[in-house]
Amino acid sequence: MASKKTPSARTSPPGSSGTTRTAPGGGKRGARDLQSFRRRLEEELTMLTGRYAGLEAATASDSDAAGELGFGDELADAGSYTFDRERDLSLVGNLRDLIQKVQTALARIDEGSFGRCEVCGEPIEAERLDALPYTTLCLADARRRSRIR
Ligand SMILES: [Zn+2]
């Protein structure tokens, strides 16, 4: 019986000439998350600015319409009218607030400070960031802040 030993045992396989491929499980995941956060924030921003513009137009044309219709029913409707208008205005205010937060978050992605608590500098909990991508506070500091007032 001719027991042949495989001749290729020692020859190194061709092709692998020292190129460093992307290491599996390397530390690139953070960067990819940033991209998806950016996309989410940009979508959010588009949605919010659209709604904001719509609301602003609505409140503006609202007062126009009231001026034209007005007169006789003005006193009777005044109460509910101001209530509606106030609610719209606070909605607009909330939206403006949110838009600002989203814009800040996008700026922080550019800066590289996204995902860090602006108070203690620690990374913000992943779950929290996932739920509120525009937050700038870690859970502990957010709790502390809401307790203060
Ligand atoms: Zn913090």
Image (spheres, rainbow, N blue to C red):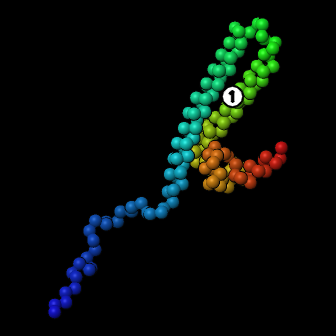
Q: Position of residue 66 (x, y in %)?
A: 71, 12
- SS label for mark 1: helix
Q: Can you say whether 61 is above or below 94 in the image?
A: above
Quadrant (top left/top right/bottom left/bottom right) for the N terminus: bottom left
**The one of 102 and 76 positioned closer to us in this rendering:** 76
Q: Can you say whether 99 is above or below 57 in the image?
A: below
Task: Please say whether residue 113 is visible from this viewpoint.
Answer: no
Q: Position of residue 36 (x, y in %)?
A: 52, 47
Q: Residues within 10 Å of mark 1 (few under 14, many from 20)?
A: some
The picture quadrant where one finds residue 62 is: top right
Q: Position of residue 18 (x, y in %)?
A: 35, 66
Q: Position of residue 128 (x, y in %)?
A: 65, 51
Q: Can you say whether 71 is above or below 29 in the image?
A: above
**The one of 75 and 87 positioned closer to us in this rendering:** 75
**The one of 100 and 14 positioned closer to us in this rendering:** 100
* Left/right of residue 44 with respect to residue 92 in the rendered view: left
Q: Residue drawn 54% across and 49% down?
A: 34
The picture quadrant where one finds residue 14 is: bottom left
Q: Residue drawn 68% across and 12% down?
A: 65
Q: Can you say whether 33 is above or below 90 in the image?
A: below
Task: Please say whether residue 53 is visible from this viewpoint.
Answer: yes
At label 1, the amino acid type is Val
Q: Which residue is mark 1?
A: 92
Instruction: Spot the residue most to the bottom.
Output: 1
